[in-house]
Amino acid sequence: MKFRLSSEYGELSEVRNMVPHPGIDFAMPEGTELRSVMNGVVERVVDFGNKDLGKGIFVRNDDGTLSIYDHMSNIKVKVGEHLTAGESIGFSGNTGNSTGAHLHYAMKNASGQWVDPTPVAEKVSNMSGNDYHFSDIGGVLLDKYNKFADKVIGAEMNMVVKPAQETLQDWLISLGHTLTDLMPEIGTGITILAGIAIMFTGNFPKYITRWGFAMMGVISWILLAK
C-alpha cells in the first residue's frame, strides 16, 4: 500500500468524541494528487471551512455506492461531472476538523448506510500521489507559501514594525513635526502595511478584494497628506 492507513473504520477516539469512525484515513503529505477510485458522477462538492469535513466531494459510483473524499486542499471537479476510475479529482489537505494532513475516505451503500471501505483501501491508496501537472502545483505551492508567510509575519512583525516606527518618529521630529500632527497619516500607513501582510496569509480568491482595499487606503493616505 502506497500510503499508511492511519485510522481504521469503526475506530473510537477522543478526537471524534468516541463516535465510531465512519471511514478510513490515509496519512499523506498535503497537496498529494487524488484520483477517483471508481467510475461515477460527482453528486456534491462541499466546503465547511474549519469544521467537519472541510473541503470534500461526494461521488455516486456506477454500482450505486457513494464515495466520499474529505479534508482536501483543492478540488478540481464540479457537480454533475462524470468521472472515470483514475481521473484526477483534486489534492489532499488538512481542512476541516483535522489533526494533520490526510485523506479521509468513506463509503455508503445504495440505501445510504455507512459501509466499511477497507476492502478497497489499497485501491484508494494506489489512486493517490501520481502525475502532478504544473498548472495544479501552482495552487499547492501557493497554499504552502501562505502558511509559511503567516508564520514568518507573525514571528517577525515586531522586529520590523517597531524599528520602522522609531525611524519614522526621528524623521518627523527632524522636520519639525510631531507624531500628533500627522497621526491620521501614520495610522493609515500602518493599516496599509498590516493589510498587505495579512493578504499573504489568505487564499488566492481573496487577494483581489484585499488588494482593492489596500489601494483605497493608499489613495486616502495621499489625499490626507496633501
Image (cartoon, rainbow, N blue to C red):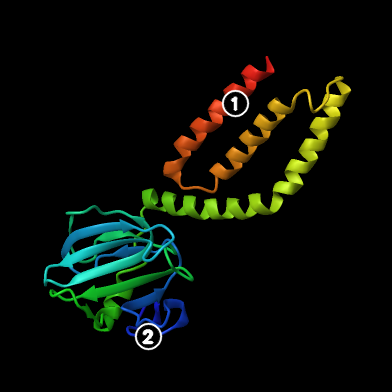
Q: Quadrant of the C terminus?
A: top right
Q: Position of residue 210 (x, y in %)?
A: 50, 37
Question: Relative to residue 196, is residue 38 depicted above or below?
Answer: below
Furthest toward the front, the residue is 180
Instruction: Identify the residue at image location x=34%, y=66%.
Output: 70
Please report whichever mark, 1 or 2, sits nearer to the chain's N-terminal start. 2
Q: Amino acid at mark 1?
A: Val
- Decide which of 189, 140 is in the foreground and name it: 189
Q: Is residue 78 left or right of residue 171?
A: left
Q: Position of residue 134 (x, y in %)?
A: 39, 50
Furthest toward the top, the residue is 226
Local crowd size for mark 2, using a 10 Å CA cut-off: few (<14), some (14–19), many (≥20): some
> Quarter of the image holding residue 163?
top right
Q: Position of residue 43 (x, y in %)?
A: 19, 60
Q: Is residue 132 left or right of residue 58?
A: right
Alpha carbons under labels 1 and 2: distance apart: 54 Å
Instruction: Identify the residue at image location x=86%, y=30%.
Output: 170
Q: Amino acid at mark 2?
A: Glu
The residue carrying mark 1 is 218
> Quarter of the image holding residue 58?
bottom left
Q: Is residue 32 left or right of residue 145?
A: left
Instruction: Identify the residue at image location x=74%, y=28%.
Output: 183
> Quarter of the image holding residue 118?
bottom left
- Decide which of 10, 146 is in the foreground and name it: 10
Q: Are marks 1 and 2 in contact (CB under 8 Å)?
A: no
Q: What is the secondary structure assignment of the residue under circle 2?
A: loop
Q: Quadrant of the N terminus?
A: bottom left
Local crowd size for mark 1, using a 10 Å CA cut-off: few (<14), some (14–19), many (≥20): some
Question: Relative to residue 20, is residue 89 depicted above or below?
Answer: above
Disc number placed over residue 11 in the picture, else none:
2
The answer to whether one can see residue 37 in this image is no
